[in-house]
Amino acid sequence: MRIVALYSFKGGELAVRRKYRDSFGEIMAVIKSVNADEHKTKSSKEKTMPGRMLYNPRALNRAFRLAFEAVGWQKKKVDCEYPTQFYVKGYVPTHNAKGAFREMDFVKGRLGVEVQFGKYAFMVYNVCAKMTIFHKMGYIDAGVEIVPVKGFADQMSTGVSYFEQFVWDLEKRGISNIDIPVMVVGIDR
């Protein structure tokens, strides 16, 4: 795969290239090592493209996981203890939140990486919530979000979000004082 687009959110590109030069080199090598064509294995069942062979997001995620782990990046998982003091008097929850957690795809040397081939909301959540939470918890200082560009996303199931849409929304949203530096990397096959 190849990097075809970069977006710097809150100075993310400069922060990553300066403070995490070696780590960014590893990220670029990982991206280049994934052969997308090996993961064009999903036969569409969608009405708009029945039988068409598509890139399989799960297989792509698995390939990225193996490549990142091979160079020492690790998943970071934190347990969640959900508050109960906000329930109204008399309410008894019917669910058990034990075992709840949040997880970052890869962390190494205080740099977090998320690889996202999913719905738009997950991209926004990763950068505007999850990375901020992991920063506040002391695990990362900056992040990299790896996402497909539109031309690549169009060759996956409908609903997969893409770099151009994500950047447009981040630009319109603006930056908050709680945001951390994130480099958004657009990839193509």
Image (cartoon, rainbow, N blue to C red):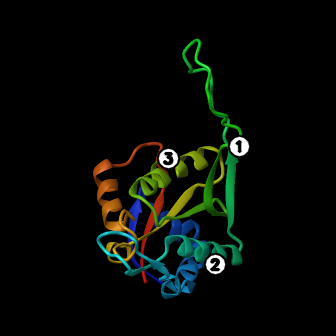
Residue 117 or residue 92, whichever sits in front = 92
Q: Position of residue 141 (x, y in %)?
A: 58, 55
The amino acid type found where label 2 is placed reads Ala
* Residue under label 2: 67
Quadrant of the frame with the C terminus: bottom left
Q: Which quadrant holds residue 99?
A: top right
Real-space Cα separation, disc 2 to disc 1, in angstroms = 28 Å
> Are there few (<14), some (14-19), or many (20+) residues within 10 Å of tag 2?
some
Q: Residue at x 56, y 75 (%)?
A: 59
According to the picture, the residue beneath numbered tag 3 turns out to be: 129
Q: Amino acid at mark 3?
A: Ala
Up the image or down, 75 lies above or below 133; here it is below
**Real-space Cα separation, disc 3 to disc 1, in angstroms:** 20 Å
Q: Secondary structure at mark 1?
A: loop
Q: Position of residue 74 (x, y in %)?
A: 69, 65
* Nearest to N terminus: mark 3 or mark 1: 1
Residue displayed at 71% across by 72% down: 72
Residue 184 placement, left or right of 91 = left
Residue at 34% x, 54% y is 170
**Residue at 48% from the left image edge and 43% from the top image edge:** 178
82 relative to 78, above or below: above
Q: In the picture provided, is 172 more to the left or to the right than 178?
A: left
Is tag 2's residue or tag 3's residue first in the polypeptide sequence?
2
Q: Examine the rendered structure and indicate whether residue 107 appears above or below residue 36.
A: above
Per the rendering, the mark at residue 99 is 1
| Residue 162, quarter of picture | bottom left
Q: Earlier in the sequence, mark 2 or mark 1?
A: 2
In three-dimensional space, the C-alpha distance between marks 2 and 3, rounded to whole angstroms, equals 26 Å
